[in-house]
Amino acid sequence: MTGTIIITGANGSLATPAVQILLSKYPDYNLVLTVRNPETIANLLTLVPRSQAEKVSFRQLDLANISAVHEFATAIADEIKSGKLPPIVSIVCNAYHWNLLVESELTADGYEKTFQVNHIAHAALVLRLIGYFKPESAGRIVLFGSENHWPGKNVLEKYPPAIPDDLETLVKPPVQEPEDPTGRGLEHYANSKLAIIMWMYALNRYLESDPTLRHITAIAVNPGNLGDSRALRVNTPAFFVFISLFILRPFLFILRRVLDPTMRTSREAAADIVEFATNTASPGERGYFTLLNKDVSSPDSLNEENQQKLWRKTLEWARITKENSALQGGFD
């Protein structure tokens, strides 16, 4: 099958092996791989065989800048319209951010950075490009959830994830006393994952009711607890780094058997994401998955009234209107 697969955060722990698997197992796809820092492109280039170089392109994309997301989407749309790229078959919203060392970070857009990178920017990207999927052919939007969206499932959780009545506090969190960078950082991350899952349910309702876009399905995947993930060593306290290097990585397969069956390597998770992105796994299915299995997300995430409130606010944050998205519903 031909078509374009877009992967954000392509230099990440999961995305890098996903690119390798796509190139070897599904070589007919065109890949558009985005990174925040263009200096990382050199490492990614080594993954691409010379015979496939024309099918892979690398783009800089800073998800902490909403204007940059819109500019990127416009460029991709223009390339598809001109025939430089084939239509999209999948968008894999892999890029992420968290920071457990500071109380809160704001982007140039004035939004809490974890929430913007993980949720708002990807929502903008998807809705800007939703009209450039391959027509009448199964399309897939792969979003990333986490068990952290479910209150009480993260043993390090201090502040349970929740969608507040005042949604603006998700993007402009109030100053908390006393300061607790790790606890609040985990809360921001968990809230972003809860928002992603809730937004996914609303998106699917609008896709299903749209006669020109109903062939596109959105899923939110909990890829498991990745013991070798770089996330455990970036913007984290020394304790996290120690746990990653000296407990999780060397004893991963034992821990999987005795503590957490979802614990695995990034490459194992990448293999699943590739199957979802190519619509090989659970073709035509929508909703929440853990690993490759259809699952039930938290009760809070299933509240349709709150899903709709978050949907409308996300349109505002992401600067999505009837004029810049092909989606027919959702703008009431």
Image (cartoon, rainbow, N blue to C red):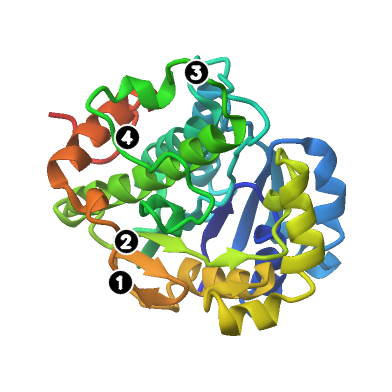
Whether residues under marks 2 and 4 lie with C-beta atoms below 8 angstroms apart, the answer is no
Badge 3 or badge 4: first in the primary sequence? 3
The 10 Å Cα crowd at callout 4, few under 14, some 14 to 19, many 20 or more, is some
| Distance from Cα at disc 1 to Cα at disc 3 | 47 Å
The picture places residue 288, in percent across and down from the top left corner, at 33, 63
Disc 4 target residue:
325
Q: Which mark is residue 284?
A: 1
Whether residues under marks 1 and 2 lie with C-beta atoms below 8 angstroms apart, the answer is yes
Closer to the camera: disc 3 or disc 4? Answer: 3
Query: Residue at the front extreme?
Result: 178
Going by the image, does 230 lie left or right of 100? right
Q: Residue at x 29, y 39 (%)?
A: 326
Closer to the camera: disc 2 or disc 4? Answer: 2
User: In the image, what residue type sits under mark 3?
Assistant: Glu
Disc 2 target residue:
217
Whether residues under marks 1 and 3 lie with C-beta atoms below 8 angstroms apart, the answer is no
The picture places residue 263, in percent across and down from the top left corner, at 59, 72
Badge 1 or badge 4: first in the primary sequence? 1
Q: Secondary structure at mark 3?
A: loop
User: In the image, what residue type sits under mark 1?
Assistant: Gly
Does any portion of residue 22 appear in the rendered image?
Answer: yes
Residue 101 picture quarter: top right
Q: Residue at x 60, y 39 (%)?
A: 97
Front one among 231 and 107: 231
User: In the image, what residue type sits under mark 4?
Assistant: Ser
| Distance from Cα at disc 1 to Cα at disc 2 | 6 Å
Q: Which mark is residue 322?
A: none
Going by the image, does 250 lie left or right of 298? right
Disc 3 target residue:
177
